[in-house]
Image (spheres, coloured by chain):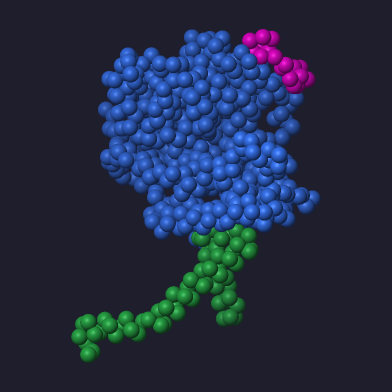
Chain colours: A blue, B green
Amino acid sequence: MARPAADGSVSLRLSSNGLKAGDTEKNGFHNKKEVFSPGNGVASRPQKHEPFEQAPMYVAVMTYLGFGIVTLFGYLRDFLRAVGLEKCHLAQEREEQKDFIPLYQDFENFYTRNLYMRVRDNWNRPICSLPGPVFDLMERVSDDYNWTFRFTGKTLHNVINMGSYNYLGFAENNVDFLKTVADKVNQYGTGVCSTRQEIGNLSIHEELEGLVANFLGVESAMIYGMGFATNSMNIPALVGKGCLILSDELNHTSLILGARLSAATIRVFKHNNMHSLERMLREAVCSGQPRTHRPWKKILIMVEGIYSMEGSVVRLPEIVALKKKYKAYLYLDEAHSIGAVGPSGKGVTELFNVNPTDIDVMMGTFTKSFGAAGGYIAGKKELVDYLRSYSHSAVYATAMSPPITEQILRALKCIMGKDGTTEGLRRIHQLAENTRFFRAKLKEMGFIIYGNDDSPVVPILLYMPGKVVAFAREMLERRIGVVVVGFPATPITEARARFCLSAAHTRDMLNQVLHHLNEVGDTLCLKFSRRKYTSRPDLCAETNLELDS
Amino acid sequence: MGLSECWKQLSWIYYQYLLVTALYMLEPWERTVFNSLLVSVGAMAVYTCYVFMPQHIMAILHYFEVVQ
């Protein structure tokens, strides 16, 4: 399952007004690299080099070795369980049912039984405070190698939180900030008890939809109670049988589920690879549907703003150019990028200076940067009005709860500056600064990191299963909570630790984390990078040809 | 202290070995099983070298006509 690392290098396009490298100020924000051309909707900012560095060969060999050994011992343990020498902690059928069709398929759970169970104390850790920049954990121990847990009663206080999607720090319990939310609970209660179409359309929902449309710069928007359901329930309303979906290799499960539910034909193009996408578009337009060769009813390109496992950013200007050339539609999922990138938090459209009306369907969630729950779909008025009637989520799912709606409203007003303070802008700048600082320091230390320099999601590659587990445990001992991800969510050889930066992290906290990361990196030998990074930003623009891998 | 320094270094190397071979994730008795297997295979290899190396070296030297 190892996928070869795609080289994300980009060809430098010189627009008609040329490119200048230098220091400029935009919104009080120093951009050391390039100048934005006048905003006429034409994107001319070249993308920064996004390397997906490959680890040395010995690392891949050792990763396979580690997995091989654990798999062998897994077979041994399964044998012992089957023979009866060892107690089986899993669900088993009753003796009388042994002749029936097996209820619990044994081999499918091999990985869960034999790898995950051994080390599952690193996941599902119970938290007993709000997930701000620091949080409290409940300490738990296991007596039988993680089959059961018990709480010791001790709480670990002030563990630095590097795993929550709290990009702008809105997961807070400051009484002053939350006063409006408390007022709305008094006014509307906490439950809506109905769907949007029936009797659950509150005035606060309309207010939020207007504000979201205003924020994104589009005609109209619609909000939904659950972020995952926004994707999975609305894509079937937009495309159907006879349509083609071109989806990126690393799209999120909600997008894949929505695409499969819609019964459209799905084709996958290589991650962020414009050659692959263009080839598929040409082939789709020329050959049409598989057997009949009729033209496709619709071609929908599905991409995400920031991919949460890699931290890479979509190449929006190129995709928009391709979509216009081949007359396809674009569905942009900005779950991680709305509020987190862009000089004023408006997402990847602002980052690349692309006109929002060029994107047909803009989708996003409120779970990450806004500290609430739910999602939205925005675009032209006809599109959103259609979705109000035809989307499963609008017709059958309960509407968003009033205190959550008010939390999103206050967060949006803060970001847009409508509450009269510059708090929103300060948070966005703080996040951008934290991101740059953290990424630069990690590269200097010698870790392999994926992703664009602007994205607040920083995955550090750990590769070997033993090191993944040891990393999580060591960091917890040093009072830092990290999220490590392994096989089913990532390719088998590329296990990683994913750091999510927040505007609420102070420079002190980041320095502390970096100091401990340095120590743990040395103790566990995690510094695989073979590049030499300096702290100077490189001033020369290189011309790289895109590699078609 | 030279000895405790040496002991620390050795135990760090053992830790790296546990991490790389993913023995870190396994239970103590499984580690014992694997280590014993590895040690016995290593010991057999060393013994074989000890028994057969002189004959092999003589055969090579004979082939290259260094010694009759």
Measured from the top left, where is residue A452 in percent x and y? Answer: 43, 40
With respect to residue A108, does A357 lie above or below? above
Please tell me which residue lies in front, A125 or A168. A125
Q: Would you say A548 lies left or right of A247 here? A: left
Q: Is residue B20 visible?
A: yes
> In the picture shown, does residue A472 fall above or below A124?
below
Q: Is residue A119 visible?
A: no
Residue B2 on image: x %, y %: 57, 81
Report if residue A197 lies within the magenta region: yes
Q: Residue at x 78, y 52 (%)?
A: A152
Residue A116 horizontal side relative to residue A341, left or right: right
Look at the image and say whether residue A298 sits in the magenta stretch.
no
The residue furthest bottom is B68
User: In the rendered picture of this protein, how many numbered marks are placed on residues?
Assistant: 0
Task: Point out residue A336 in the picture as x, y percentages from the top left corner.
Answer: 53, 33
Q: Residue at x 22, y 82 (%)?
A: B63
Quarter of the N terminus of chain A within the rendering: top left
Task: Name the one closer to the observer, A473 or A370.
Answer: A473
Determine the image quadrant of residue A466: bottom right
Point out the image quarter for the C terminus of chain A: top left
Q: Which residues are magenta?
A: A185-201
- Which residue corresponds to the image point at 63% horizontal and 60% vertical from the top-left? B27
Residue at figure coordinates x 67%, y 9% from the top left: A198
Residue A94: x percent and y percent?
Answer: 71, 40
**In terms of image quadrants, where is residue A313?**
top left
Tell me: residue B28, above or below residue A184. below
Q: Main secondary structure of the magenta part?
A: loop
